[in-house]
Image (cartoon, coloured by chain):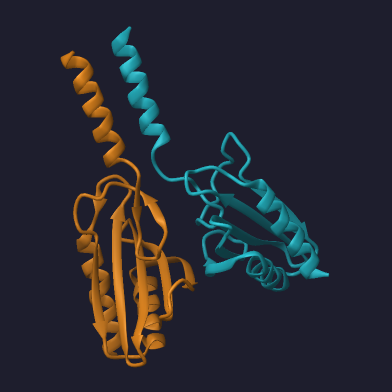
Amino acid sequence: MKNLLNLAGLVAALFLTGCVNTVTQNQPGALPTYRDRIETRQQKPLEPVFEASKRALNSFGNITSEGKVFVGTNQVRIVEGKINGRSVYMRVEEIDPQLTAVLVQVRTKLGGTDLQIAKDVVRRIATELE
Amino acid sequence: MKKGFFALLAGAVIITLTGCVSTVTENKTAGVKLSPDQLENRYEVSMNQAYDASKAALAKFGTVSRESNLLTTTNQVRALEGTANGREVWVRVEALAPKLTSVKVQARSKWSGSDVQTAHELATRIALELSQ
């Protein structure tokens, strides 16, 4: 019984340590069991939405990196930054020429999430696009 | 007593060894940091020249999956990610002076950790691209 518990502890340690998938990776990965990201879709081309996303992130915090992802057939831009000590990851993906999806993910240092900041950023992107 | 101690020790070792490894592009990747996985070369060329050469070298050797600008430092930094030789590769191109650029190359495999040989190969290809 004790051995079984030890084994379960080791397996749990293996699964719990490691990296969390972010939406700015080449593949955004499956959703975790809890929500750490919000998706919004805008009826605008990719570039204006990407610029609006950068302005939105800059208005709350600062951008640490921006770039392009070449994996997949859709055009994808990424922005990463910090707001209130939280790490913010944004993936701007062209669904079709007039429809763009924005995924906003917020993580705390200890692996938690902060959906309130994600919601604020999503709202700000919509405001910037108007 | 002994079994419990060894189980605890094994747990501590697993937690220490599994986890994240920092990449030269200021990201994290899953892996084990046991041996050097990166190397740095400095070239007396402008940053754009070094970046273009790095991108061309990586595109010829494998595939470029991502390019980005890193905005955390005062130096201008650009980064490339991709795969080459079946390994994940990260390249950091940093302007140290207007005519001095640092190029860091890191290569890791998914399971066996670092692959400095692939990093060396890519660094050589970047140097060859710059000499053309």
Q: Which chain is cyan?
A: A
Camera-nearest residue between B101 and A84: A84
- Residue situated furthest front in the rendering: A84
What residue is shown at x 33% (from left), y 48% (from top)?
B110
- Residue situated furthest right in the rendering: A130
- Give residue B94's position: percent from left, percent from top: 36, 79
- Give residue A97's position: percent from left, percent from top: 74, 67
What residue is shown at x 75% (from left), y 63% (from top)?
A124
Camera-nearest residue between B132 and A34: A34
Q: Horizontal placement of B132 versus B82: left or right?
A: left
Q: Is residue A108 above or below residue B62?
A: above
Q: Is residue A23 above or below residue B106?
A: above
Residue B86 lies in what quarter of the image? Answer: bottom left
Camera-nearest residue between A113 and A37: A113
What residue is shown at x 43% (from left), y 81% (from top)?
B76
Name the quadrant of the N terminus of chain B.
top left
Give the color of chain B as drawn. orange
Q: Horizontal placement of A48 versus B38: left or right?
A: right
What residue is shown at x 23% (from left), y 28% (from top)?
B10
Residue B130 lies in what quarter of the image? Answer: bottom left
Name the quadrant of the C terminus of chain B.
bottom left
Q: Horizontal placement of A92 versus A111: left or right?
A: right
